[in-house]
Image: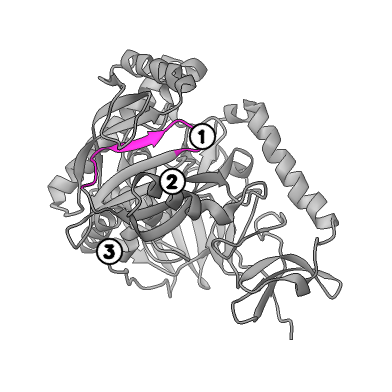
Amino acid sequence: MNCSYWVESTPKTDYPSLSEDIYTDVLIIGGGITGISTAYLLSKSSLSISIVEADKMAMGVTANTTAKITSQHGLLYDYLLNSFGFDIAKGYLDSNEEAIKTIENIIKEEKIDCDFVKQDAYVYTCDKSNVQKIVDEVSAVTSLGLKTEYVTKCPLPFKIEAAIKFPDQAQFHPRKYLISLLQILTKKNVNIFENSKVTDIKHVKDKYEVYINGNKIIAKYLVMASHYPIKNFPGMYFIKMYQESSYAIGIELEKDVFDGMYISCDDPTTSFRNTIQENGKKLLIVGGGEHKTGATDVNIDDTYTNLENYIKSIYPKAKIKYKWMTEDCVSLDKIPYIGEFSNFLPNMYVATGYKKWGMTTSHVAAKIISDRILGINNAYENVYTATRLEPIKNSKEFGNMLKQSIYSLAIDKLSSPIKSYTELQADSGGVVDYKGKKLGIYKDKHGKMFAVIPYCKHLGCELSWNNLEKTWDCPCHGSRYDYTGKIITEPTVESLDVIDLE
């Protein structure tokens, strides 16, 4: 597996795992930017707070982002205006603009050194057929009260047809920011537990019992900040969103790197930003290659190669230093789910569906949820209502999800493997026939084979093999496992069943 610059340039955390039963007022499940930010806002109250993380803190999606702090989430606002009206579009924009200020204020107040830099953000096109989309977006954002600009030139090293420019956005080093917040939380007596995977959640009277490592935490308030909700019912979030994977490379150039943050509205999507490394040199981060997690209709193996070839067509002497990938949840209506997890489970909250814009959206979520717990009215709560059913009205995408689920749950299970395990090449894998049994097998570079039962432990969909990352990916809801069957990404909470071929 490859590693992001954010991970390589920061120390790993070392917090204890849960080893006894405890009580806490607020339990936050998930040690990423949403969970940590929520804990920080709540730490100013008298409530006792605990965070549990299945792996290491700030090492999931947060550690593999491009870390743009912006309210410019692609070409979104014309869509929001036409689909939901002025109030929702305005609330979405204003809440994310406030989130930028919240992050900046926290950094200043706590004196956090995290490479925070103000930058302009652009959505651009190199395709004349997309210019009208830019024009419409400028009109939409202007009508919502944000000063923006239509431009035909920008600092990118190639010609564009048009772009929309958002001023006074920002970027930072996400792990430097979060590691500092964790140190602050420790001083405020917030309980932080790593390697503490939640295996069960029970609602008992007016409390929640959360089971971890053979122990339990009893809490009055429960915050599901685990990227994808690990509890299926009654929230049913697995029918209201899907997961999308994307990739990034970090490169050094012989010439100076341009400033600003950029994302194209063309197909394929390409993203740019820079950061200053520990050695003082600028690193250009180029992102793209997005596809639905577990997709079998794209050539995933070429993802990094395509990014490298693209950037070398612009900078032939570019030096590739880092490669990484991530995935994020996308709601069917493009608005995140933030707030009450379900009308049937009081005091349980959720934040998910950020569609890869989690730096600001996480702070929107942290404010909405912490306000709700503290009994404070939040002006933006209704924009993100998590219990809404309207997303299912997106009949096309909903139909695609049902079709994929039916295929993976039923058709794939009934079909025979395409090839025998004897046909597997070294350092490759797949669902194959092994002496009459349908198994998922990876053969390493030395010929050793690792076998699993290739059905996701979340809801049973047949897994697909990702040869680029050497992982088993679920095409239904985005769970991911390494080749030994261990969990990488939720919503699954169980590792795969492993088969000893000997």
Q: Earlier in the sequence, mark 2 or mark 3?
A: 3
Quarter of image, res 430: bottom right
Q: CA distance from mark 2 to mark 1?
A: 13 Å
Whether residue 209 is visible: yes
Q: Secondary structure at mark 2?
A: helix
- Where is residue 46? Give x, y as percent: 26, 51
Mark 1, other Cα within 10 Å: few <14 / some 14–19 / many ≥20: few
Please state which amino acid type lies under the numbered disc 3.
Ser
**Dominant SS in magenta:** loop
Q: Secondary structure at mark 1?
A: loop
Identify the residue at horizontal 44%, vertical 42% (top origin). 356
Placement of 299 over or under 53, stated as above or below = above
Where does the magenta region start and end? 256-269
Residue 438: quadrant of the picture: bottom right
Looking at the rendered structure, which numbered label has been put on residue 310?
A: 2
The x, y position of residue 392, in whole percent, is 63, 30
Lateral position of residue 481 relative to residue 65, left or right = right
Q: Which residue is mark 1?
A: 267
